[in-house]
């Protein structure tokens, strides 16, 4: 994925296809995946604050395997405005559809039955023993990251004049030099 640099080597998640009941009963499993290192995303550095808690629900529907990945984790990340380190909790919920059938057509009889939120079916080999969900867990994390991290909704950020944290104290610096009324005052001085 663009703009992502990951050092999360330890992150690994897979399920055995034999574990997914063919009866149509959903198979559920949960795991705590240890992660370390740093995730760089759009210039922000996200440092994991603990393991990723993942729960997987998978079930067979004819040749297809519907997988739901729900996860929760925390990252230490600087606030986009004031740079104060803040704890970001994320919750991800993504659904994937894997298929063991070759060249599944768009107008396939099953296509219309896909639930909302399912993305296009991902082809897998029906003889493979394990379904590696690592890239999808990873994708779920990345897609759950906010564009901007704020330590609080109304973070006042840094003063562009003195660099002080405006959440902590109002320095009173004049920051809007483009204000014509202030320009007049400046000229008078
Ligand atoms: Zn802030
Ligand atoms: Zn200031």
Image (tube, rainbow, N blue to C red):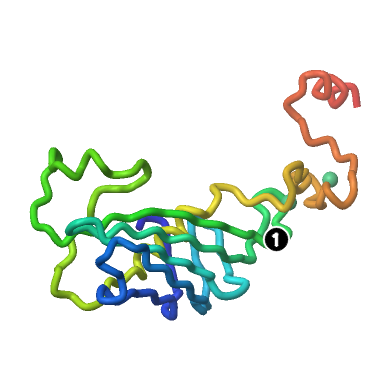
Expressed as whole percent of the image width and height from the top left, the position of residue 127 reads 13, 74
Q: Nearer the viewer, residue 177 or 59?
A: 59
Residue 163 left/right relative to 60: right
> Relative to residue 95, is residue 28 depicted above or below?
below
Total of numbered circles in the picture? 1
Secondary structure of residue under mark 1 = strand
Please name the residue that numbered disc 1 is placed on.
86
Say if 187 sits above or below 69 in the image. Answer: above
Left-right relation of 20 to 90: left
Query: Residue 130 placed where, x, y %?
Result: 26, 76
Q: Is residue 112 left or right of residue 69?
A: left
- For the point 33% across and 74% down, the residue is 15
User: At 43% from the left edge and 58% from the top edge, which residue is drawn?
Assistant: 140
Quarter of the picture for ligand 2?
A: top right
Residue 87 image-quadrant placement = bottom right
Q: Position of residue 186 (x, y in %)?
A: 85, 26
Q: Nearer the viewer, residue 50 or 56?
A: 56
Q: Position of residue 78 (x, y in %)?
A: 66, 59
Q: Is mark 1 within 8 Å of ligand 1?
A: yes
């Amino acid at each position: 994925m663009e703009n992502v640099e990951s050092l999360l080597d330890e992150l690994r998640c897979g399920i055995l296809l034999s574990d997914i009941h063919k009866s149509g009963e959903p198979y559920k499993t949960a795991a705590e995946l240890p992660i370390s290192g740093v995730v760089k995303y759009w210039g922000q550095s996200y440092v994991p604050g603990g393991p990723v808690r993942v729960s997987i629900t998978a079930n067979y529907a004819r040749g297809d395997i519907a997988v739901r990945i729900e996860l929760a984790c925390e990252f230490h990340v600087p606030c986009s405005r004031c740079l104060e380190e803040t704890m970001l909790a994320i919750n991800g919920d993504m659904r994937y559809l894997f298929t063991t059938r070759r060249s599944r057509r768009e107008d396939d009889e099953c296509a219309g039955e896909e639930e909302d939120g399912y993305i296009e079916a991902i082809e897998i080999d029906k003889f493979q023993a394990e379904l590696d969900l690592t890239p999808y867990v990873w994708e779920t994390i990345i897609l759950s990251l906010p564009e901007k991290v704020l330590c609080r909704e109304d973070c006042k950020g840094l003063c562009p004049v003195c660099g002080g944290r405006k959440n902590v104290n109002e320095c009173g610096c004049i920051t809007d030099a483009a204000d014509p009324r202030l320009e007049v005052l400046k000229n008078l001085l």
